[in-house]
């Protein structure tokens, strides 16, 4: 008996020092030393707290312990320092409340078996403050407002925190494809949650990687490389072995893939955003240095059909081999009064020989205004202006010309920075499902249609 208690005492001392061993002490059947990814997650969380990094992003497959580990980590942090203030945000109030109750109940757990360790064995001086133990907001003895659980529909008013943990905000594929939901998540994170973070505070985002512009993706773009640490775990490793056979076997994984479909399975289990998996364009060719000889410099312009649409003007050099080298792009929601001048000046500066306008929804009048500005204000008739009515199905055109676009249109190196909105519209366009905007692929397809037929037939 004494020997067993001595071993338990050694484990308790180790748990006080190292977070993984605390998790192992509380749940030895799950936190096993041979589950290397769990050791890695726990060590990453512990090291992050004392590192120079501001944000930690953990992408982990379902049922691999991400929420469980986050809850145990909150316990361990508060046990180490009861003055710490922690706020967690989950998908909804039900999940955030469950997270909070689990942590609170673990801290309050009474010891019933001398061989079964509880929180107070490791941290004997940390208690929930009497009369201040609500489900979503509670304090520790010697602390004040140590913990708040909230969600995008909850509140964080009056609460400041040293550590902010966001746990799985996206519920399913429908939300992953919903631009409005993802935008609301980002606004909640930046406008509400970040305003609660104390100076020098830390942020942990734990989630399945549903979409390239989900909260994890937006955070990766927002913060610099020096500020963020990103750890990603795939269920199926590069050598086709499993991350953990005991948690998810190869057969179960294959069954899930068949049931879910490749795109949803890849997001859930391989951390491959669903929009990137289903995107139409898989790559684009680029150029740098000297340009080839052009037979003409051309432009394809599609005016904004509705208030939320973009005007897209692509200026490119057409080679004798009917390849296109993009020279300039105008992609904007600005009014026609502004874009008429912008497009005219772009055609003039780039020495465009021929410009083709889609005449649908005001395009004809726009083309005439551009021609007038070129003649009257810029004093040139070098650019031939033509317009036509586009009667073909837009989606079918875009899909059928996608391969040509990837094989024969060249963009300048760094085009993602030069024309960021156009770049985003091209790289995120989905083969199936509803796309928020199709103006960029539509205009780019216009170049493919013209050059793949040997030239712009409208000008012949």
Image (tube, rainbow, N blue to C red):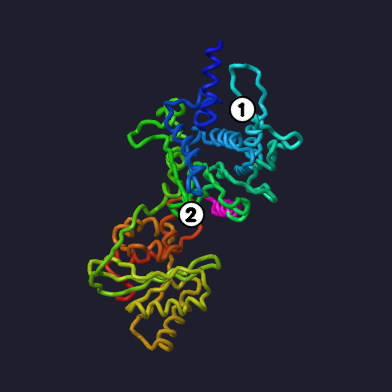
Q: Nearer the viewer, residue 241 or 451?
A: 241
Query: Vertically, is 255 above or below 201?
Result: above
Residue 16 occupies quadrant: top right
Outermost residue on the right side: it is 131
Q: Residue at x 66, y 26 (%)?
A: 109
- Residue 381 falls in image quadrant: bottom left
Q: Secondary structure at mark 2?
A: loop
Label 1: which residue?
119
Q: Quadrant of the C terminus?
A: bottom left
Q: Is residue 385 left or right of residue 7?
A: left
| Residue 30 location (% of width, % of height) | 50, 26
* Residue 137 is inside the magenta segment: no
Q: Does the magenta portion include 178?
A: yes
- Residue 223 got which mark? 2
Looking at the rendering, the stretch of residues picked out in magenta corresponds to: 177-189
Q: Secondary structure at mark 1?
A: helix
95 relative position to 325: left or right? right
Location of the N terminus (image quadrant): top right
């Amino acid at each position: 008996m004494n020997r067993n208690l001595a071993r338990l005492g050694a484990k308790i001392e180790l748990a006080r020092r190292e977070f993984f061993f605390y998790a192992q002490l509380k749940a030895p059947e799950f936190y096993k030393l041979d589950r290397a990814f769990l050791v890695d997650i726990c060590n990453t969380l512990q090291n992050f707290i004392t590192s120079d990094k501001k944000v930690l992003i953990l992408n982990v497959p379902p049922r691999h312990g991400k929420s469980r580990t986050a809850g145990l980590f909150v316990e361990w942090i508060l046990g180490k320092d009861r003055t710490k203030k922690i706020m967690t945000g989950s998908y909804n109030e039900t999940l955030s409340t469950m997270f909070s109750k689990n942590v609170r109940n673990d801290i309050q757990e009474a010891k019933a078996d001398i061989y079964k360790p509880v929180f107070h064995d490791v941290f004997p001086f940390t208690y929930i403050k009497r009369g201040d133990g609500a489900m979503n907001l509670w304090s520790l003895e010697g602390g004040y407002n140590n913990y708040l659980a909230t969600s995008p529909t909850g509140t964080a008013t009056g609460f400041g925190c040293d550590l902010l943990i966001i746990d799985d905000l996206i519920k399913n594929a429908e939300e992953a494809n919903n631009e409005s939901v993802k935008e609301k998540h980002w606004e909640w994170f930046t406008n509400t949650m970040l305003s609660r973070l104390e100076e020098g505070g830390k942020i942990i985002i734990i989630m399945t990687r549903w979409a390239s512009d989900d909260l994890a993706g937006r955070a990766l773009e927002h913060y610099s490389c020096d500020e963020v640490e990103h750890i990603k775990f795939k269920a199926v490793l590069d050598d086709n072995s499993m991350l953990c056979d005991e948690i998810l076997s190869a057969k179960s994984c294959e069954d899930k893939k068949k049931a879910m479909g490749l795109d949803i399975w890849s997001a859930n289990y391989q951390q491959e955003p669903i929009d990137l998996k289903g995107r139409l364009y898989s790559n684009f060719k680029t150029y740098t240095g000297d340009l080839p000889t052009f037979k003409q410099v051309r432009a394809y312009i599609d005016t904004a059909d509705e208030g939320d649409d973009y005007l897209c003007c692509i200026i490119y050099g057409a080679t004798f081999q009917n390849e296109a080298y993009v020279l300039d792009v105008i992609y904007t929601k600005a009014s026609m009064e502004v874009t008429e001048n912008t497009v005219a000046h772009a055609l003039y500066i780039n020495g465009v020989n021929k410009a083709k306008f889609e005449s649908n929804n005001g395009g004809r009048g726009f083309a005439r205004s551009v021609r007038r500005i070129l003649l009257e204000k810029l004093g040139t008739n070098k650019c031939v202006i033509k317009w036509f009515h586009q009667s073909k199905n837009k989606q079918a055109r875009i899909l059928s010309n996608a391969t040509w676009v990837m094989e024969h249109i060249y963009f300048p190196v760094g085009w993602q920075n030069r024309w960021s909105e156009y770049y985003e519209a091209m790289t995120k366009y989905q083969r199936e499902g509803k796309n928020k905007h199709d103006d960029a692929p539509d205009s780019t397809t216009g170049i493919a249609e013209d050059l793949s037929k040997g030239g712009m037939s409208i000008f012949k």
